[in-house]
């Protein structure tokens, strides 16, 4: 799994967690339960992972500079 894919997966988790707690549900991942009381933490995590996805997407879309040969 690439770093970008991992960041996308984590972003999706935080999006799903935010949706669940806004519906009054809870979510459990890796033994931790996320609920309404964690909403601020969930939103902070979502924003951090969104920035990571944006950063990694930009860096993966950059092309190598072209090299010119002068003879």
Image: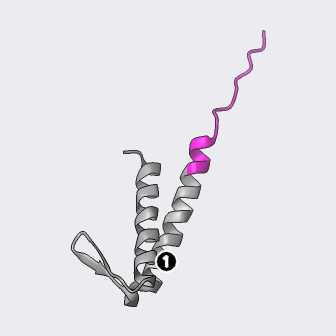
Quick one: which residue is furthest to the front in this view?
23
With respect to residue 35, does 59 lie above or below? above
Name the residue: 63% across, 32% down.
64
Secondary structure beneath dot 1 equals: helix
Q: Which residues are magenta?
A: 57-71
Name the residue: 43% across, 83% down.
23
Name the residue: 78% across, 9% down.
71
How many C-alpha atoms fall within 10 Å of the one at disc 1: few (<14), some, or many (≥20)?
few
Name the residue: 54% across, 64% down.
50
43 left or right of 17? right
With respect to residue 70, does 19 lie above or below? below
Q: Position of residue 44 (x, y in %)?
A: 49, 77
Quick one: which residue is furthest to the right in this view?
71
* Depth order, front residue of 37/61: 37
The way the protein has been coloured in the rendering is one colour
Quick one: which residue is furthest to the left in this view?
31
* Depth order, front residue of 56/22: 22
What residue is pinned by disc 1? Answer: 44
Q: Position of residue 37 (x, y in %)?
A: 38, 90
């Amino acid at each position: 799994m690439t770093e970008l894919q991992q960041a996308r997966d984590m972003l999706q988790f935080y999006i799903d967690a935010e949706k669940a707690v806004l519906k009054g549900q809870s979510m459990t991942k890796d033994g931790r339960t996320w609920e309404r009381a964690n909403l601020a933490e969930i939103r902070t995590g979502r924003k951090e992972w969104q920035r990571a996805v944006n950063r990694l997407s930009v860096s993966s879309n950059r092309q190598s500079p072209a090299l010119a040969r002068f003879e």
